[in-house]
Amino acid sequence: MNSIRNIQYIMNAYIALFISFFTKNRENLWLIGGHNGSLYTDNSKVFYEYILDNHPHIDIYWVMNKDALVSKQIKSKKLIKGSIKSYLYFYNSKVVLFSDTLNLDIAPFVFVLPCIRRVYKKKFKVYLSHGTIAFKKMPKKNGIIQDIKESIFRSYNLASASTSLEKKAMLGYGIKSSNIEILGSARHDCLRAIDSKQKMILIAPTWRGWLSHNKTLEGTEFFEQYTQLLGHPLLNTYLKKHSIHIHFYLHHMFHRFLPEFEAYENTMITILKPSARISESIMSAKMMLTDYSSICSDFYYLKKPVLFFQFDRDEYIKKVGSEIDLEKNIFGEVAYSVDDTADKLI
């Protein structure tokens, strides 16, 4: 299925290139997107809405997947990622902004396609990031794939970092130091604590790249640890007794595995759907449980407590790494087992 879709993307890219020779350029056209075209959240969303509200002279479009469940949430003009129209608008654009990568969020394959690559180089490319990068290091691989990745990051004209530590992490990606500006995070402009009557804990684990090609998460340590926590009898008894709810949010790169967790949903535990407005859960939650998710930086910003559940810390450090010293500089309590995590939550 993916190979057929990718062939269609490439065909549409060249059809749009041919059409572009006979069309008039649109003035001040910007494209923006994020989260592989599937979500409407984080820095891209906030910056997009800022442009709509404050710079009406900018002709800006949000790029999304054809089947994205968040279509109705997008405030204004939209394009379908990989469509002929989307590629045509990309060729005519002045600025492109994205929170993941340009390939995933805006225009697949334009960096590597003959002839089209020359068009790509002329675009002003802005990397907004979708979370604080400092909990992850850029994975290094040998060979042509790594060379292409580093070349893509070097091609970014502007990258927005929230802190000097995040700038250091971006340098590890290959982004030029002169193109990284410490500007904060756009989403923090709209981030505030909401005084909700419902007592709620947000649980948001990050994804594991080494599991991304699995057909299922069942049987993995990740699945076993988190489902044991969600089904922990003492924790569930405590939740019911004190009317405390849990919102469980699986990383968007793992969303296809959501049905495997739905059996653990009950009156006190909600498994959030891909279309959930995660920013609302962040603002209304009383605390957060995570392992290495960058969402914890939003809780730190809001001065809310964070509990870190790091049952696989050694494996994570070996396979991913962190700019933050997970032994010394973590900003919250740490638990390493399900029982310890349940006790600390209680």
Image (tube, rainbow, N blue to C red):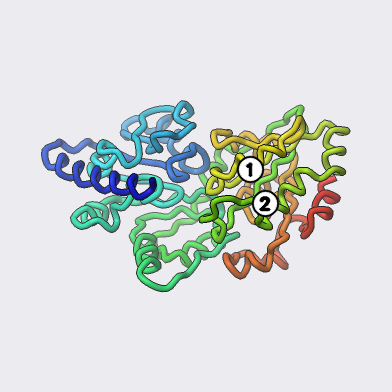
Count neighbours of disc 2 (C-alpha within 10 A) and say few if under 14, some if 14 to 19, many if 20 or more: some
Horizontal side, residue 22 vs residue 322: left or right: left
The residue tagged with tag 1: helix, strand or loop?
Answer: helix
The residue tagged with tag 2: helix, strand or loop?
Answer: helix
The Cα atoms of the two marked residues, 2 and 1, are separated by 9 Å
Mark nearer the N terminus (2 vs 1)? 2
Asked if residue 163 shows in the view, the reply is: no
Horizontal and vertical percent position of residue 176? 39, 65
Q: Quadrant of the N terminus?
A: top left
Q: Which mark is residue 223?
A: 2
Q: Which mark is residue 260?
A: 1
- Closer to us: 230 or 161: 230
User: Which amino acid lies under the numbered mark 1 shown in the image of this protein?
Assistant: Glu
Horizontal and vertical percent position of residue 223? 67, 51
Q: Residue furthest left?
A: 22
User: Which amino acid lies under the numbered mark 2 shown in the image of this protein?
Assistant: Phe
Horizontal side, residue 167 vs residue 146: left or right: right
Horizontal and vertical percent position of residue 89? 26, 39
Q: Which residue is pictured at 55% across the width and 37% down the height? A: 274
Q: Which residue is pictured at 43% across the width and 55% down the height? A: 159
Q: Which residue is pictured at 51% across the width and 56% down the height? A: 213
Q: Residue furthest bottom?
A: 142
